[in-house]
Amino acid sequence: MLVSGAGVAGAALAYWLQRYGFEVTVVERAPSLRGGGQAVDVRGSALDVVEKMGLLEAVRERKTALLGMSQVDADGHEVHRTTERTFSGGAVDGPDIEILRDELCALLVSAAEPGIEYLFGDSITTLVQDEDGVRVRFESGTERSFDLVVGADGLHSVTRRLVFGPEADYLHPVGTYIAGWSAPNHLGLDRWEIFHQPGDDSEVWGSMIMTVRDNTELRVFTGFQTDEPLADMLPRDVDAQKRLVAERAAHLGWEMPRFLKSLWESDVFHYDVVAQIKMDQWSRGRVTLLGDAGYCCSPLTGQGTSVALTAAYVLAGELHEADGDHRAAFAAYEDRLRDHVADNQALLVLGQALAAAAGDPESAPGGGIGEEGPVNTEMFRAATAFDLPDY
Ligand SMILES: Cc1cc2nc3c(=O)[nH]c(=O)nc-3n(C[C@H](O)[C@H](O)[C@H](O)COP(=O)(O)OP(=O)(O)OC[C@H]3O[C@@H](n4cnc5c(N)ncnc54)[C@H](O)[C@@H]3O)c2cc1C
């Protein structure tokens, strides 16, 4: 079986498929496991999935373990401080785990036994399926056949494009772009997050700065509100993306000029459109989609990683139950997960309200949604609950 993408979804799926005795090859476009990205959240049923993988303690040990957050205005004056929750991770003493994406991926990969074949620095270029299997051609020029192909290759999935058609048919931008990068902890912060509000700025709605890796570095995370197709103009051109971020944020006060200098030294830069993927079907023949590739919830829901972990567990479990009969397994996979995905995609309204409130210098994070922030709403709790089947 071929899995395209060694992100959270692909690595978790490979683990579960191997555990059920399937032979697995994973192709990843990056030359090695991708570094970078910001903190992602593991919560609800995803905590049960990592526990079943024997990883709960290891994941917990690497949690960002922030002690709280403050909010500063355009000039850096503190307007709010709390040790009860953070902007990115919710309640400080809650069960949810906030962890760097690359550290989570590395743990998921390390949990598997030797024997999963990883093809780094390659990508599917063509995919032809018939009754017996899928003939795959890779960028490297090699051609191989697989019984099934799973596209776990993220928001801009090549598997989706090849099998289901152009990205534009499924990608729904929410009008925001997010850039994230690393910077030295020159502020001397101790396990802390700062939310910087630029005030009445029309495009940048805010920047979130958090300590990571035992306070040795900061991750800076800036959101732009715009209807321009900025990502489309700059496909995979990191320098152009950095230039764009530097230009759009050039006027910001407080410590932002210093952070923007670090942008050029950071090798963990990540920039993308914030969008959701909506599809009537996730599977076609012997090919199915998993995680962001099939149903990206968007970072504004905070749920992409948890949904991907839960879905990887279900997809592998259904293939196991159906003894490899992909028709039965793919149908059961969609059936079990459709409502859960819809509930999580609907959380976008909470994230958008939070972003809108963040543009208002008078409001504390969570303003407009309730003092406690979106992750403590009933809607959020209902969406994250999912009864994992036993396979
Ligand atoms: C570098 C990076 C940084 C991120 N940062 C954040 C963040 O700060 N906050 C947040 O909420 N979410 C972030 N995300 C998204 C988040 O990781 C996902 O929403 C979530 O974890 C679901 O994971 P996924 O495996 O479905 O997709 P992803 O995590 O996007 O993983 C997809 C994988 O597929 C690989 N890939 C892409 N194209 C191909 C191809 N053609 N062939 C082979 N492999 C391919 C990618 O390199 C990646 O490893 C980031 C994703 C990436 C790739």
Image (spheres, rainbow, N blue to C red):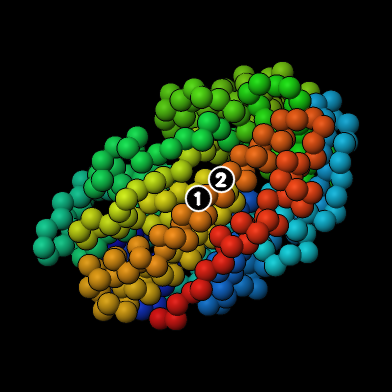
- Numbered circle sitting on residue 13: none
From the top left corner, tell me how far across and down residue 51 is, in percent: 57, 75
In this view, the residue in front, 187 or 90, is 90
SS class, disc 2: helix
What is the three-letter code of the residue carrying label 2? Answer: Leu
Q: Which residue is mark 1?
A: 345
Q: Is residue 237 left or right of residue 279?
A: right
From the top left corner, tell me how far across and down residue 67 is, in percent: 82, 56
If the image is split into quadrants, where does the C terminus sit?
Answer: bottom left
Is residue 32 visible from the viewing direction of this image? Answer: no
Work out which residue is located at the far left of the displayed protein and give it: 131
Q: Are marks 2 and 1 in contact (CB under 8 Å)?
A: yes
Q: Is residue 334 left or right of residue 366?
A: left
Mark 2, residues whose alpha carbon is within 10 Å: few (<14), some, or many (≥20)?
many
Residue in the image at 70% along x and 67% along y = 95
Mark 1, residues whose alpha carbon is within 10 Å: few (<14), some, or many (≥20)?
many
In this view, the residue in front, 2 or 391, is 391
Q: Which residue is mark 2?
A: 348
In this view, the residue in front, 232 or 370, is 370
